[in-house]
Image (tube, rainbow, N blue to C red):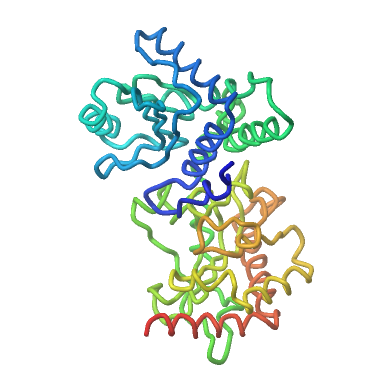
């Protein structure tokens, strides 16, 4: 049996691909390859679905191959399921919370017609039916995949456990049920739409405060003014964020952030979307208040094994953090989908602002809480040696 972890670790994060879509694709492909009962049930389902829609989908036998990211002349459908004699191929495209690219399925169809003739079908699997566009032959939702798997009652305990884990993966990404609109949320709809700008304004009003990290003397300094990043439309999910976060950046350069400023950089603010930072496990229900350690790309190969980083994490784990705050070492937890941000302090936003109802109270809370976390870092004996080593390694990479 091939390794599940090897399969799901094939993809690196990028601005073009969703890490969770890649993860689910590889886990699903692994399940089909290694669980004959699930594979047979899915084959029967597709065959019957095709009959209902007047599409001929033969029963693909259990010896057929399941591949991911096959090259279609520069285009890469998520998964291919081929009969053992290559007499028929099912082409899969998977979406979670994103839309198809322009002519994405047409490009697959054009290539498949040249390579497979008429012996193929295209299956689109998405989070909800509203994403069913570009006329796939079969359009499914992930909750239907879960129902197929749940209906398989044969197998040993290990097979049942693996199926349950895949279903839990879908559930944890809100792919199994769509709740009705909460009437209370409608009443607060306009207020909720303002939250991103209000968080941005808090950071803006406090940017010129005197922050503890800016008081460092010596070789390691963060003298530049706190920086509110202005991201391109491709690097944000709303109007006021950059990579899903809103707040202040402190870097080691004397000007606004440029390459080399994250050695390391310190972000203080809010995370409103988990996709880029790979923090789905930390924020299932609401935004987070966060302090994030940011690391430039040349240092990504060094950070996991760096003794100074490990010493800093151990020291932080030994001390008591300010009330309500938690620490997440993404590397140790194997949450390495985005190595730009290996270490995070976090707490739920509702807890962060609990009982603070005025602008003055919320600004003061932001300043007090973030300054406190910065001081926690500064009080760590391992923090300055870690920064010095990051500078040394960065300079070595530039030679």
Does 389 sit above or below residue 167? below
Give percent across and percent down for residue 102. Answer: 26, 35
Residue 291 sits in quarter: bottom right
Does 333 sit above or below residue 379? above
Q: Nearer the viewer, residue 308 or 49?
A: 49
In the rendered structure, the answer to whether residue 243 lies left or right of residue 180 reads left
In the rendered structure, the answer to whether residue 379 lies left or right of residue 8 reads right
Q: Nearer the viewer, residue 348 or 99?
A: 99
Residue 55 sits in quarter: top left
- Quarter of the N terminus within the rendering: top right
Give percent across and percent down for residue 8. Answer: 53, 47
Q: Nearer the viewer, residue 339 or 349?
A: 339
Q: Nearer the viewer, residue 156 or 207?
A: 156
Does 241 sit above or below residue 390? above
Q: Residue at x 78, y 71 (%)?
A: 319
Q: How many marks?
A: 0
Give percent across and percent down for residue 303. Answer: 55, 71
Give percent across and percent down for residue 20. Answer: 51, 44
The extreme front residue here reads 85
In the rendered structure, the answer to whether residue 172 lies left or right of residue 25 reads right
């Amino acid at each position: 049996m091939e390794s599940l972890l090897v399969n799901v670790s094939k993809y690196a994060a990028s601005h073009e691909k969703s890490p969770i879509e890649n993860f689910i694709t590889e886990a699903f492909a692994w399940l089909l390859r290694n669980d004959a009962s699930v594979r047979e049930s899915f084959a029967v389902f597709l065959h019957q679905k095709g009959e209902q829609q007047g599409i001929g989908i033969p029963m693909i036998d259990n010896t057929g191959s399941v591949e991911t990211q096959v090259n279609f002349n520069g285009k890469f459908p998520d998964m291919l399921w081929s009969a053992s004699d290559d007499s028929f191929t099912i082409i899969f495209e998977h979406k979670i919370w994103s839309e198809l690219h322009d002519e994405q399925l047409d490009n697959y169809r054009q290539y498949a017609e040249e390579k497979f003739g008429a012996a193929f079908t295209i299956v689109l699997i998405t989070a909800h039916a509203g994403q069913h566009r570009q006329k796939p032959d079969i359009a499914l939702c992930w909750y239907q995949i879960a129902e197929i798997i749940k209906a398989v009652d044969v197998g040993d305990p290990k097979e049942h456990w693996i199926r349950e884990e895949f279903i839990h993966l879908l559930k944890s990404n809100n792919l199994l049920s769509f709740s009705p609109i909460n009437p209370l949320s409608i009443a607060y709809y306009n207020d909720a739409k303002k939250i991103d700008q209000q968080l941005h304004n808090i950071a803006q009003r406090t940017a010129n405060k005197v922050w503890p990290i800016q008081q460092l003397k010596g070789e390691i300094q963060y003298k530049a003014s706190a920086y509110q990043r202005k991201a391109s439309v491709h690097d944000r999910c709303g109007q006021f964020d950059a990579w899903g976060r809103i707040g202040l950046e402190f870097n080691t350069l004397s000007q606004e952030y440029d390459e080399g400023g994250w050695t390391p950089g310190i972000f203080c603010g809010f995370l409103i979307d988990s996709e880029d930072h790979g923090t789905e496990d930390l924020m299932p229900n609401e935004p987070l208040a966060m302090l994030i350690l940011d690391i430039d790309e040349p240092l990504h190969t060094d950070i996991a094994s760096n003794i100074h980083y490990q010493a800093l994490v151990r020291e932080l784990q030994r001390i008591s953090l300010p009330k309500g705050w938690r620490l997440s070492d993404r590397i140790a937890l194997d949450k390495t989908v985005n190595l730009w941000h290996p270490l995070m302090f976090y707490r739920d936003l509702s807890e962060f602002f609990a009982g603070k109802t005025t602008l003055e109270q919320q600004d003061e809370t932001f300043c007090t809480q973030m300054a406190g976390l910065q001081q926690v870092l500064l009080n760590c004996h391992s923090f300055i040696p870690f920064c010095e080593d990051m500078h040394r390694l960065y300079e070595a990479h530039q030679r």
